Amino acid sequence: MPPARVLFLAATLGGIGFAVFSVMTAPPPLWGALAAAGLYVAIVLAGVFVLRLRMFADAVIRGPAGARGVVLTFDDGPDPVHTQRVLDILDEHGAKATFFVIGKKVDKHPDVVKEIVARGHEVGVHGWAHDRLFALRGPRRVRRDLARAIRSLERVTKRRPTLFRPPVGHTNPTIARVAEQLELTVVGWSAAGYDGLGGADARKVAARITRGLDDGDIVLLHDAAERGDHEPTAAKSLPEILAAAKDKNLRVARLGDWVTALES
């Protein structure tokens, strides 16, 4: 069990015990109650915002023990222009990647998704609407969004997707439970360049990723802007990232292979 999940369970049990003790004896000082509540909220928010803690979901954030190479993943597509550029660069380097696509964009650009698959890449779910408040939604709405995203991809690829990256990387017990019910493996990352931000500098993006790049890393990049309001930097950063991986003798691995190894 991930340490963060142990912390969450311990904090929950501690909070229950604290409440029972207060009822049976005497109410605690106001400052003590507020401090305890604040600490618990901080722990929960850390679990929601930091997927790599794996507090609520058994997310894949790195390759299995002894994994060789790195995995490239791209979020927020498909885009008829920018995704195509990323695909061309990957082809030039003989590399395969995983694209976590937004369902409503899949409905709008199905041919781009078909091109991704035709070139030998994997596709996964990134929600249907890419709801930035996904972690605040109830079970019914979460399930409806993910089920709709699955149907969108299934219509285009004729295969049911099994990989899921939560929108904005936020998760909670509801999202984790619904993903499990829909047989989706939650995927995080261990290396990010923050290239999804508008105005991101391509060199700085590449530097952030390549500085500590090592075997087992899952790299997060974006082949499209979430709202389509700017040109993503991935296409400019990718050649340098791939060159650095080659210099470090890091092959580009397939995410599906790592997931299979972790689940076996």
Image (tube, grey):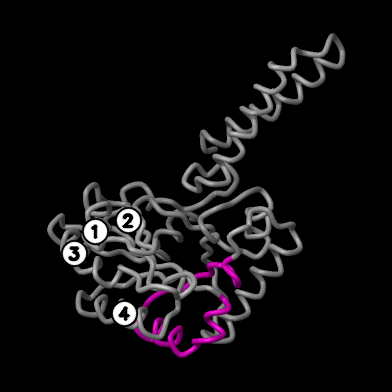
Residue that lies at the very extreme toward the left in this rendered image: 247
Name which residue type carries label 4: Leu
Q: Judge by depth and name the residue closer to the eye, 158 or 85.
A: 85
Find the distance from the CA under tag 4 to the CA under tag 3.
Answer: 15 Å
| Secondary structure type for disc 2 | loop
Tell me which segment is drawn in magenta: 103-130
Q: Residues within 10 Å of mark 2 (few under 14, many from 20)?
A: many
Q: Earlier in the sequence, mark 2 or mark 3?
A: 2
Q: Name the residue under label 3.
A: 240
Where residue 59 sits: x, y (%)? 51, 52
Marks 4/2 in contact by CB < 8 Å: the verdict is: no
Marks 2/1 in contact by CB < 8 Å: the verdict is: yes
Find the distance from the CA under tag 4 to the CA under tag 2.
Answer: 19 Å
Q: Earlier in the sequence, mark 4 or mark 2?
A: 4
As displayed, is residue 179 above or below residue 124?
above
Q: Which of marks 2 and 1 is nearer the N terminus?
A: 2
Q: Mark 1 points at which residue?
A: 206
Q: Name the residue under label 2.
A: 193
Q: Residue at x 36, y 56 (%)?
A: 194
Where residue 36 sits: x, y (%)? 67, 23
